[in-house]
Image: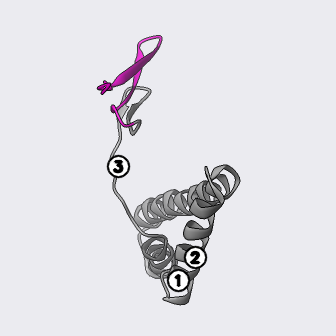
Amino acid sequence: MTVSSPTFYHWGDKLSAFTADNRLVMSMGSPLANVPITIAELQSFVCTLEQAIEDEPNTRQRVALGTIKIIFEASLRQAENDYAEIIKTAPTGTDLEEYMLSYARAVKGGAL
């Protein structure tokens, strides 16, 4: 059994690092958080932020809330890209079928 180790990439004085299981934990010298969040939660947060931005009287707070909203929207776009990649690269037809069925159940159950 081969044991993997973290991977480090140097970009001048900037470091990017991946864990042994390929999770990006530092990008160009900035530590990253890898937090699982559902698409339904992201969609809900974006809607909540839209209302909060509209209701917020303080300009700085509106800008900060807008930045959070942009990050969540980018996360939703990444989830769409990940979905497309899974569809195109599933190793077997059975894997693809199981993924599609699970995805359909999530949609039907209100998770999307």
**Is residue 59 shown above or below 106?**
above
Please tell me the numbered disc located at residue 3: none
- Seen from the viewer's position, the closer of residues 9 and 51 is 9
Residues drawn in magenta: 1-21
Q: Quick one: which residue is furthest to the bottom in this view?
A: 109
Q: Residue at x 45, y 80 (%)?
A: 48
Q: Nearer the viewer, residue 39 or 44?
A: 39
Of callouts 1 and 3, which one flags the residue occurring earlier in the amino acid sequence? Answer: 3
In this view, which residue lies farthest toward the right?
88
Query: Based on the displayed image, in which of its 4 quarters is residue 32 positioned?
Result: top left
**Residue at numbered disc 2:** 101
Q: Which residue is drawn at 50% across and 57% down?
A: 71
Q: Position of residue 75 (x, y in %)?
A: 52, 58
Q: What element carries label 2?
A: helix
Verify CB contact (< 8 Å) between mark 1 and mark 2. Answer: yes
Which of these two is toward me, 22 or 8?
22
* Kind of residue at badge 2: Leu
- Residue 38: quadrant of the picture: bottom left
* Label 2 CA crowd tier, 10 Å (few <14, some 14–19, many 20+): few
Left or right: 40 as drawn, with respect to 34: right
Q: Label 1 belongs to which residue?
A: 105
Q: Which of marks 1 and 3 is in front?
A: 1
In the image, what residue type sits under mark 1? Arg
Q: Answer whether residue 57 is magenta in the image.
A: no
Circle 1 — which element?
helix
At a point 46% along the width and 82% down the height, the residue shown is 55
Dot 3 corresponds to which residue?
A: 34
Cα–Cα span, label 3 and label 2:
26 Å
Q: Residues within 10 Å of mark 1 (few under 14, many from 20)?
A: few
